[in-house]
Image (cartoon, rainbow, N blue to C red):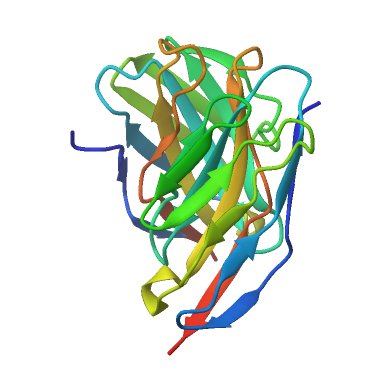
Amino acid sequence: GDSVTQMEGPVTLSEEAFLTINCTYTATGYPSLFWYVQYPGEGLQLLLKATKADDKGSNKGFEATYRKETTSFHLEKGSVQVSDSAVYFCALSDPNAGKSTFGDGTTLTVKP
Amino acid sequence: DAGVIQSPRHEVTEMGQEVTLRCKPISGHNSLFWYRQTMMRGLELLIYFNNNVPIDDSGMPEDRFSAKMPNASFSTLKIQPSEPRDSAVYFCASSTTRTGGNSPLHFGNGTRLTVT
């Protein structure tokens, strides 16, 4: 079945540091890939997505590229802010399965 | 777009009581999902509906849990009887399949359930 493996946390960075959160996936079909972010006390919300190989999703300074050859969708940001502190989830959506598969989440803390 | 609306936001109940969680999906979305989130087990899919029909309930932990979707704008998740190990945050999410599976999930803000 489908699966998503993402970098274990927690991750602690200083403000303006470079961020990478690794995500790899296994899927039988041609999934769409997503990054969601969850702030304390809230539900998950979409951060960015990519629907086919070599697509780059981007939003709020975050980027991720759909790499079919390495089955990866790593999240990056060049300069993190304290307000980026949250839990980040990598996920895939398989049209044939009709549902999404989530990674375990990575907690990011950014210190001033 | 009012987003996915869940109620109540917090629920505290005693073991053995019935608990009903409610969800109103985004208008026009035809898929609805119930998730449970705990520190120990992370985010778990309990059940999902497509066009109001339950498609996969394999994540429902046991017969104490049941879910219904009587119409396109309302769903409930019921736990009867509740147990302390059911304490968690329960999320409802909706999406549309009309874009061929590329649509993201839209989550509500969750119901934090505490069973004492």
Residue A13 x %, y %: 57, 81
- Residue A91 occupies quadrant: top right
Rendered position, A3 above or below A45: above
- Which residue is painted at 59% across and 41% down in the image? A65
Instruction: Work out whether residue B8 or residue A6 is closer to the camera in this orientation and state it.
Output: A6
* A52 on left or right of B114: right
Residue found at the far bottom of this picture: A112
Q: Give the side of residue A10 with respect to residue A43, left or right.
A: right
Taking the image as shown, residue A22 lies to the left or right of residue B31, namely right
> Which residue is drawn at the image coordinates 76% and 36% (left, top)?
A71
Which residue is at a point 43% across and 38% down the rendered structure image? B92
The location of residue B100, given as percent across then percent down, is 49, 11
Q: Quadrant of the N terminus of chain A?
A: top right
Q: Is B97 rendered above or below residue A43?
A: above
Between B79 and B26, the one nearer to me in the picture? B26
Q: Is residue B49 above or below residue B5?
A: above
Q: Quadrant of residue A68?
A: top right
**Quadrant of the drawing holding the C terminus of chain A:** bottom left
| Residue at 52% over, 38% down | A56
Q: Is residue B90 visible?
A: yes
Q: Residue furthest left?
A: B1
Q: Position of residue B8 (x, y in %)?
A: 31, 50
Vertical comparison of A49 with A89: above or below = above
In front: B29, or B116?
A: B29
| Res. B81 visible in picture | no
Position in image of residue B115 (x %, y %): 53, 60
* Near-viewer residue (B84 or A26): A26
